Image (spheres, rainbow, N blue to C red):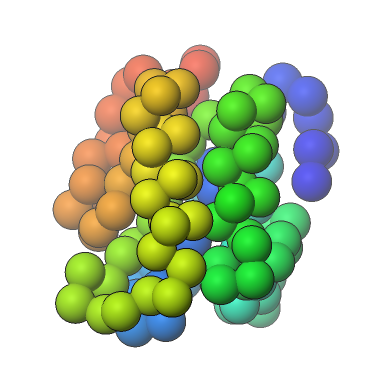
Amino acid sequence: MNDSPAKKTIALIAHDGKKTALVSFVESHREWFEQFNLVGTGTTGGRILESGLSVECLASGPLGGDAQIAARITEGLVHAVIFFRDPMGKHPHEPDINMLLRQCDVHSIPLATNISTAHLMVGSHGFGSKPL
């Protein structure tokens, strides 16, 4: 995953009904995402890999991927999270999702949970030497 220790890492996660939207978003901002190390949960990461971007794939969310990303946040290894959530769906791993969101807040990690916020993240100027 770490192409360069100086590169920041962005975690990419999406619920099933939002995976296509996240992949499209990443593809439309490919040049920006190429500046960072990317890590994703199982299927989401795999779909982004298929689009041609390099991404480290962890376990799927329900199998512990959300918890893996939360752990990396606490270790200082993830610097931003884009998590396209489906607020209308039921998710059996909701405790892991809540833990991930909590860790973003505890460690002041930028978190985009929808496309509008993700656009703001990509266009801002507060992430290292490159815009986030």
| 66 up-or-down from 5: above or below | below
Visible residue check, residue 21: yes
Q: In the figure, residue 61 lies in which quadrant? A: bottom right
Residue 24, how many percent across, how many down? 40, 72
Front-most of 122 and 90? 90
| 20 up-or-down from 114: above or below | below
For image coordinates 53% across by 30% down, the residue present is 79
Residue 115, how many percent across, how many down? 25, 59
For image coordinates 43% across by 57% down, the residue present is 95
For image coordinates 62% across by 60% down, the residue present is 65
Front-most of 110 and 54? 110
Front-most of 69 and 126? 69
Visible residue check, residue 8: no
Q: In the figure, residue 48 lies in which quadrant? A: bottom right
| 73 up-or-down from 114: above or below | above
Residue 58, how many percent across, how many down? 71, 61
For image coordinates 51% across by 16% down, the residue present is 129
Q: Is residue 17 left or right of residue 53?
A: left
Front-most of 28 and 44? 44
Q: Give the total of numbered labels.
A: 0
- Of the 4 image quadrants, the one containing the C terminus is top left
| 116 up-or-down from 70: above or below | below
Residue 127, how many percent across, how many down? 44, 22
